[in-house]
Image: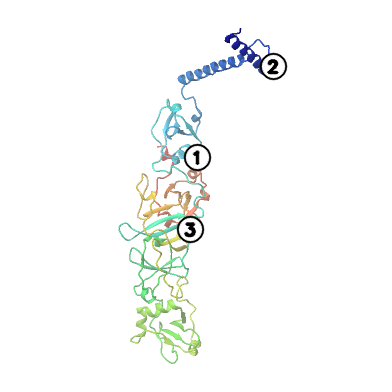
């Protein structure tokens, strides 16, 4: 009678034969088919333990074995803290900002991330760099295709202050034939027309030209973006009041205004000058009749155009000299309507081009900007804008000057923080990664609006 033990042993024997047959293709094999697997596993675990133990001992004896950061002209970044260093005379010197690191190392350096353990035994030194220098450098050509908008923003304490915005949005010009009556901080009034500012030289000019609406208050920096035009004043008349030729059998005086009326055609007006009659447009006619000096020519008579027959007109000489420059509108321009709620008047222009466009754009309140606060190394002047807004990624190397100038002026690095940093030479610009000959031109009236940062001088970076 078989016992249970005999049955278990018999079953194990049968299973062993089956396993040997499957694994080793030999059912009668005397060796355990799992022996090799077990032995290999045990030996592998022991070897892995020995390797780990060896590396552990080596790590204790020589912590931080990475030495790639010791290569010359390498910017070292500590992984755990993000701190940046340069290796100077065997000591780690913290760097205040990326621009300083570039100047210290003579160009944009490779960056190597290193663990704190690798740097633990290296001596430290005092920080190096330029206080307030940029921590990022804009790409070359980052100002290409940008528009500079100078807006008359509301001041915090009243009045208006200049606010600058630099972006790539297309300009939205107002009607080219429209005009805007503005008043500067010195109470002087100007007529803005076709990108120029025409000074109203006398108080009577505005009413005789129909500019009776309220003037828009603008800061001086806003006016400086416009090309200066001729003054709007009385017409220059040499020999005013002198006797002139007899016209239609009546004595005349130099400086009188005449009108010829022909049925079916508009009235034509003329100013009598020494060398003959000069035709008058609507603007010139208003200035001639409104000028108090003209009243002295008429004496006690009413100041108005004197009728002139076509026959007399054909017999009189005509002056070849214009009475007004071309930059003055021949007809009285219509004033532009006020801007929409939340907008203000802005002068929009390219950096190097003097021509400007009048737009109703921008906020009516000062714009927030990183450049409006107080920062180390940042200098503000009376010409600096109250607020600056730069589109992200806008910036680059620029040269002070205008497109019509043969040679530009000083070099500046403009960042999207709204700050300009003086660059002392073309060699320094090259070290920063820029080509000085390809620097874009920006007019002084625009660059003056940006606050000025520290000079990017390699000698200063080493101190």
Between 321 and 76, the one lying in front of the other is 76
The numbered mark, 3 or 2, whose residue comes first in the sequence reads 2
Residue drawn 46% across the image and 19% down it: 61
Q: CA distance from mark 3 to mark 1?
A: 30 Å
**Residue denoted by label 3:** 350
Check the image and report above or below for 78 versus 183. Answer: above
Marker count (numbered) = 3
The percent position of residue 377, horizontal first and vertical second, equals: 37, 45
Between 375 and 198, the one lying in front of the other is 375
Q: Quadrant of residue 254?
A: bottom left
Q: CA distance from mark 3 to mark 2?
A: 87 Å
Labelled disc at residue 108: 1
Labelled disc at residue 25: 2
Q: Nearer the viewer, mark 3 or mark 2?
A: 2
Do the numbered discs 3 and 2 sit on residues whose CB atoms are within 8 Å? no
Check the image and report above or below for 16 versus 141. Answer: above
- Secondary structure, mark 3, is loop
The numbered mark, 3 or 1, whose residue comes first in the sequence reads 1
């Amino acid at each position: 009678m078989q016992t249970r033990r005999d049955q278990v042993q018999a079953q194990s024997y049968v299973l062993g034969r089956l396993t040997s047959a499957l694994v080793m293709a030999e059912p009668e094999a005397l060796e355990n088919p799992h022996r090799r697997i077990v032995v290999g596993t045990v030996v592998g675990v022991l070897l892995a333990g020995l390797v780990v133990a060896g590396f552990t001992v080596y790590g204790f004896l020589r912590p931080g074995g990475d030495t790639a950061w010791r290569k010359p002209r390498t910017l070292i970044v500590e992984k755990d803290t993000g701190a940046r260093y340069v290796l100077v005379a065997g000591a780690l010197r913290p760097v205040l900002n990326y621009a300083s690191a570039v100047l210290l190392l003579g160009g944009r350096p490779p960056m190597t991330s290193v663990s704190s353990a690798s740097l633990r035994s290296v001596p430290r030194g005092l920080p190096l760099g330029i206080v307030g220098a940029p921590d990022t450098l804009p790409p070359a050509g980052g100002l290409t295709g940008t528009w500079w908008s100078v807006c008359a923003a509301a001041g915090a304490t009243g009045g208006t202050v200049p606010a600058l915005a630099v972006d790539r949005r297309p300009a939205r010009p107002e009607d080219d034939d429209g005009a805007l009556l503005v008043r500067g901080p010195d109470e002087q009034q100007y007529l803005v027309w076709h990108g120029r500012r025409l000074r109203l030289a006398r108080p009577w000019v505005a009413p005789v030209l129909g500019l009776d609406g309220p003037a828009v208050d603008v800061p001086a920096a806003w006016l400086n973006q416009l090309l200066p035009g001729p003054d709007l004043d009385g017409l220059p008349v040499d020999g005013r009041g002198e006797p002139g030729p007899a016209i239609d059998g009546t004595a005349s005086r130099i400086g009188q205004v005449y009108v010829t009326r022909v049925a079916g055609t508009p009235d034509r007006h003329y100013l009598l000058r020494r060398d003959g009659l000069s035709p008058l447009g609507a603007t010139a006619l208003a200035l001639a009749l409104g000028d108090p000096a003209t009243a002295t020519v008429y004496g006690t008579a009413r100041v108005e155009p004197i009728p002139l027959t076509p026959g007399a007109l054909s017999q009189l000489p005509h002056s070849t000299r214009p009475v007004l420059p071309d930059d003055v509108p021949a007809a009285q321009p219509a004033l532009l309507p006020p801007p929409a709620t939340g907008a203000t008047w802005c002068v929009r222009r390219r950096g190097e081009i003097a021509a400007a466009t009048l737009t109703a754009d921008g906020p009516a309140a000062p714009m927030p900007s990183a450049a409006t606060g107080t920062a180390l190394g940042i200098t503000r002047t009376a010409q600096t804008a109250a607020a600056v807004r730069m589109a992200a990624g806008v910036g680059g190397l620029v040269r002070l000057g205008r497109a019509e100038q043969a040679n530009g002026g000083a070099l500046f690095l403009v960042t999207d923080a709204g700050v300009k940093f003086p660059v002392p030479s073309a060699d320094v610009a090259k070290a920063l990664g820029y080509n000085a000959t390809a620097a874009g031109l920006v007019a002084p009236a625009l660059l003056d609006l940006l606050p000025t940062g520290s000079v990017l001088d390699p000698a200063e970076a080493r101190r």
